[in-house]
Amino acid sequence: MKVTLSALDTHESSFTPLVVIELAQDVKEETKEWLKNRIIAKKKDGGAQLLFRPLLNKYERETLENQNLYLVGASKIRLLLGAEAVGLVKECHDNTMRAFTYGTRQNFKGFDDNNDDFLTMAECQFIIKHELENLRAKDEKMIPGYPQAKLYPGKSLLRRLLTSGIVIQVFPLHDNEALKKLEDTWYTRLTLKYQPIDNIRGYFGETIALYFGFLEYFTFALIPMAVIGLPYYLFVWEDYDKYVIFASFNLIWSTVILEVWKRGCANMTYRWGTLVMKRQFEEPRPGFHGVLGVNSITGREEPLYPSYKRQLRIYLVSLPFVCFCLYFSLYVMMIYFDMEIWALGLHENSESEWTSVLLYVPSIIYAIVIEIMNRLYRYAAEFLTSWENHRLESAYQNHLILKVLVVSTVFMYKFILIMKLILATLLITSQILNQIVESLLPYWLQKKHGVQVKRKVQALKADIDATLYEQVILEKEMGTYMGTFDDYLELFLQFGYVSLFSCVYPLAAAFAVLNNFTEVNSDALKMCRVFKRPFSEPSASIGVWQLAFETMSVISVVTNCALIGMSPQVNAVFPESKTDLILIVVAVEVSENLNYFE
């Protein structure tokens, strides 16, 4: 017999706070009461059936600043039923991986009615986020107290509250004890060791764990390229000898490392249960809108939007826009080349000190223009992808990444084309600056703010839970982690540098390895102490980034095969007929690239 929420008492007088909701300071009382009622109402009545209370009670709010902060949690039974609703997969006593159900809970390893550790804190917070995001309007025409905040059946309430400025932010709380244990095994001791990927997954979820797992794997995969590149840099070789050997090794390396990663990734995600997690359980993203109806696969009530309308938006608006941006970027590149020729001609005519400096001006201007264009294009890509109205968060992320990668990759190639003579400076400077800006500077500012908050809390005479109050106040001021896009993009560019341009600068892989060894620690610091804790997101792979790396590998195969085919050594084997040489090169390219379509 299927157990439902309505048949169980999911109320608890006290609960462990898992998620914080911050409201604007001037929110009306009727709005607060309506939001509270929708969160605690039973599922059959359109609520989330969660636990909800203010951070401060009435008397504490009179003593302290009214922060309009509210805590959200759930009873143990509610979380277990939520785990069934979202399709979490757990290991059974017979060592198989199955979707968890409350009715068969005793069949799963680690479950005990008296034990609260069956679900990780990250999974509990993911369940609460899922329930909050799926609070949808029924008969309401507007948010109570805010007639301008219109609602229609099926509209995500949380989305509307955020866009209307009523809710400032929603974030999960850190578990300070578990975080300290994770830090001790992760980055606080600067020793060469493997990362605790399973512990990272237990605390931050699969998406973050897969990023750190890929970062570690990619760093070790770069070591052979770094070792081979060192003697090529130290000793003078005939240029074509260098190209042929490097190209041959690149041909094998760029293909093999991605295939090995796919196997390792599948092993990890199967052990975590996300590899066999059914996609039909993935709920609509908060920004998805449409007419409220019944999903034919899940049988659940949710917004429905015709796919042909989405396809029309993609092919008639988004695709032409991306093509226009590519054309415009090529046009800007031609302007740069004209400036470069002009500066070079001016220098050849006068050969003065100021014309020597002028030679660098076109590259500097072009680098600044590229950065500005990248930022503007990123904003436009996010707007267009949101406007396309994708149902699933994974589909939204995939389309966004593909849009950004197309133009970003072109920028990368053009930038390396003009900066290849100072590629070492570019690599080292950008890597150091990235780590300072992303981790060290925000960490220092966060520590400074933390001292101020502690002094303020210690000066209070109110009888409150100072530890919880201090934690919430500190974490609400932290920056919000915007996802793994920029982190993967950095690794993607590294892969491009190494697989395509090792012949230009053989130490590229060595500098990438050195950067990544420190990147592991700086990114860990960033996740633990700089940003708010991100919500866990189940993932079965690194998603569209696998396709991006494989596409780059295909380009690398074509480039390196062409380099080998143009070398004097290979041409000497076919002194009279070049047709045979071309056919062999094409055959090698095709055979290598077929690996990605099997």
Image (cartoon, rainbow, N blue to C red):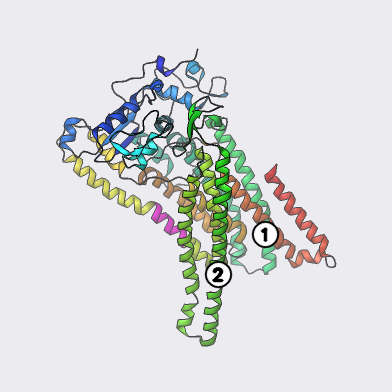
Name the foreground residue: 322 vs 315: 315
Q: For residue 457, what is the image quadrant?
A: top left
Is residue 507 shown above or below 362? above
* Front-lying residue, 371 or 445: 371
In the image, is residue 510 part of the stretch drawn in magenta? no
The residue that appears at 47% across and 41% down in the rendered structure is 208
- Among all residues in the image, which is located at the extreme bottom? 350
119, above or below 404, in the image: above
Label 1 vs 2, first from the N-terminus: 2
**142 left or right, relative to 268:** left
Q: Quadrant of residue 584?
A: bottom right
Q: Which structural element holds mark 1?
A: helix
**Span of residues in magenta:** 429-438
Residue 101 percent across, percent down from the top left: 50, 20
* Most distant residue in the right direction: 576
10 Å crowding of disc 2: few (<14), some (14-19), many (20+): few
